[in-house]
């Protein structure tokens, strides 16, 4: 949500090639066979109504909603009724369909009822063939049968499906809409912005690796926001992404399956080079402030990614501070206008204020000039994290009036302390504390690259004693497998490493009383002759 909006109606550069999602990376079969990309049947989307889009854009701007760069237009196509099939030697089949949306700067396809049987692959590529995405497999299809592609340049693209003979006739897909990109904010942030790979970001590498660009989807179309992967006190590596409620306020449950999360979308160096990043698609809404984007609360939303973030991404689970304590220095890391990741710096005390709703719901921040620019925020930055001097998140961006031509105008971040509290008009179960502090009732938490492995790599590789029930309540039983029969001592520690229980082991089965223990995560270890031989994580 911004007090002023500025989108440039131009096409920007797109990176070619698959952007992640762990696609196969194989070239489309038609390209390998040298087939003519124009010798296929075509389908044209319904006309794009520029006047209606412009009128709605003005209304969205006035309401502080996320600016859209793409609008949905209808079409109807499926494997059974459209496209061109080609029989291949050995019984394989190849299906291709040329899709057009006249006047589009770029297009994103939103497929439904997708079924990709074993061995089948799906590709989408630009009409020129210089941008290729895929191959998509069954692993990329959401539970509801949705599959969304990335942007392809121009007003035409080709959808290609290769079906092996062994699964002939089993594949399915339906295309009922596409996002017609009519204005782009990608790679066009203000010249004052500071790349996160500049020296200003040298002390914020971990925090940088928690920030992700989000393609948000609502019934009208697609837009950009920013979010951050956050840690939680259960230390279970849940892929929670914190952003702003106004980014998702119009999104319906079915839209979340096609949200896109783009990791490591940043320059390779300060003002130089490019990196494509890594895409993940699909999430579930877990909680939000239910405040219409800060009008009556602190403007937060918590999303859980459909799948775990691959270790190869190098993502950091950011820490947070919900004490309500301000800071006199820190940064915001964000994707202004959907651009490469940027960093904005503040060096003065934050001010407790409001966005127009309850008092004390937001932090007001004024950005400072640095060596390489004067970082501000822009459309696309919404939902970005505000880090304090201790490098923990203390707020998420609602909006403001800082731009390159007004760099000292203030911005406003919903407070983490308000997200955690009871003053938002959301159900009690959606208070952020219930998700980020499910155990220990903590108000601060440090970040980690792999919080669910905090018991240590050696312990992870050790044999595990059997514990039941797990989770437990008042007591639990420990049974030693054959590999641990020689163990002579048992210890239980809490998540901080504090020893809670120690006992000698005299048989292969024993019961431990835990009625006085708090809810939380615990580690049970067994020893033989003073050497730890087994370990297992438990939850109460």
Image (cartoon, helix red, strand yellow):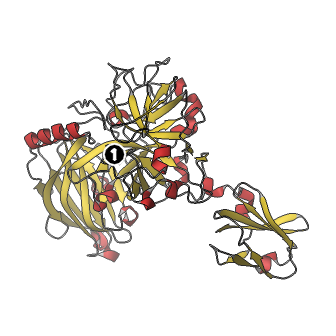
Image point (64%, 69%), residue name: 540
Q: Which residue is more in the foreground, 124 or 532?
A: 532
| Residue 492 visible within the image | yes
Of all residues, the one furthest to the front in this rendering is: 359
Residue 521, given in percent of the width and then of the height, sits at 65, 63
Q: Is residue 482 left or right of residue 369?
A: right
Q: How many marks?
A: 1
Residue 77, given in percent of the width and then of the height, sits at 15, 63
Please give the residue where the numbered disc 1 appears in the rendered image: 296
Q: Quadrant of residue 306?
A: bottom left
Q: Is residue 199 left or right of residue 284?
A: right
| Circle 1: element type | loop
Of all residues, the one furthest to the right in this rendering is: 529
Q: Which residue is more in the foreground, 323 or 32?
A: 323
Residue 176, given in percent of the width and then of the height, sits at 17, 60
Q: Is residue 114 above or below residue 423?
A: below
| Residue 36 visible within the image | no
Q: Residues within 10 Å of mark 1 (few under 14, many from 20)?
A: many
Q: Is residue 215 above or below residue 274?
A: below
Residue 57, given in percent of the width and then of the height, sits at 17, 39
Q: Quadrant of residue 224?
A: top left
Image point (50%, 29%), residue name: 197
Q: Which residue is more in the foreground, 495 or 115?
A: 495
Q: Which quadrant of the figure contains the N terminus? A: top left
Image point (11%, 44%), residue name: 102
């Amino acid at each position: 949500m911004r007090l002023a909006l500025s989108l440039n109606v131009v096409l920007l550069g797109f990176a070619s090639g698959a952007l992640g999602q762990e696609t196969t990376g194989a070239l489309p079969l038609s390209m390998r066979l040298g087939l003519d990309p124009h010798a296929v049947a075509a389908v044209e989307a319904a006309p794009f109504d520029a006047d209606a889009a412009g009128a709605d854009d003005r209304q969205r701007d006035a309401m502080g909603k996320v600016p859209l760069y793409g609008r949905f237009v209808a079409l109807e196509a499926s494997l059974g009724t459209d496209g061109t099939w080609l029989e291949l030697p050995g019984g394989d089949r190849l299906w291709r369909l040329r899709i057009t949306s006249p006047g589009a700067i770029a297009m994103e396809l939103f497929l439904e009822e997708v079924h990709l049987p074993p061995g089948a692959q799906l590709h989408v590529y630009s009409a020129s063939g210089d941008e290729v995405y895929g191959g998509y497999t069954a692993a990329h299809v959401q539970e509801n049968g949705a599959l969304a592609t990335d942007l392809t340049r121009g007003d035409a693209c080709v959808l290609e499906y290769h079906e092996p003979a062994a699964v002939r006739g089993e594949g399915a897909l339906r295309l009922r809409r596409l996002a017609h990109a009519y204005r782009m904010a990608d790679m066009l942030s203000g010249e004052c912005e500071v790349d996160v790979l500049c020296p200003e970001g040298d002390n914020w590498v971990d925090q940088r690796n928690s920030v992700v660009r989000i393609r948000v989807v609502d019934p009208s179309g697609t837009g950009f926001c920013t979010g951050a992967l956050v840690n939680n006190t259960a230390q279970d590596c849940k892929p929670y992404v914190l952003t702003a409620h106004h980014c998702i306020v119009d999104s319906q449950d079915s839209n979340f399956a096609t949200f896109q999360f783009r990791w490591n979308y940043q320059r390779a160096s300060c003002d130089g080079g490019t990196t494509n990043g890594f895409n993940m698609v699909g999430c579930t809404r877990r909680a939000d402030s239910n405040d219409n984007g800060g009008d009556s609360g602190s403007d937060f939303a918590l999303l859980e990614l459909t799948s775990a973030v691959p270790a190869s991404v190098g993502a950091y689970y950011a820490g947070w501070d919900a004490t309500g304590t301000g800071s006199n220095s820190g940064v915001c890391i964000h994707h202004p206008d959907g651009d490469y990741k940027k960093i904005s710096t503040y060096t003065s005390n934050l001010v407790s204020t409001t966005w127009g709703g309850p008092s004390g719901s937001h932090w007001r921040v004024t950005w400072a000039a640095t060596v390489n620019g004067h970082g501000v925020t822009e459309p696309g930055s919404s939902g970005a994290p505000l880090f304090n001097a201790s490098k923990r998140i203390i707020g998420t961006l609602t909006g403001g009036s800082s731009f390159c031509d007004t760099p000292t105008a203030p911005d406003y971040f919903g407070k983490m302390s308000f997200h955690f509290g009871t003053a938002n008009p959301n159900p009690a179960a959606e208070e952020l504390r219930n998700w980020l502090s499910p155990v220990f009732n903590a108000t601060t938490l440090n970040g980690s690259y792999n919080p669910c492995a905090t018991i240590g790599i050696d312990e992870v590789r050790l044999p595990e004693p059997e514990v039941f029930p797990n989770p437990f309540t008042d007591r639990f039983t420990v049974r030693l497998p054959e590999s641990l029969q020689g163990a002579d001592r048992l210890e239980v520690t809490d998540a901080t490493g504090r020893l809670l229980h120690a006992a000698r082991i005299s048989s292969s089965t024993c019961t431990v009383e835990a009625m006085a223990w708090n809810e939380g995560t615990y580690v049970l270890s067994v020893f033989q002759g003073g050497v730890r031989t087994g370990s297992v994580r438990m939850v109460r």
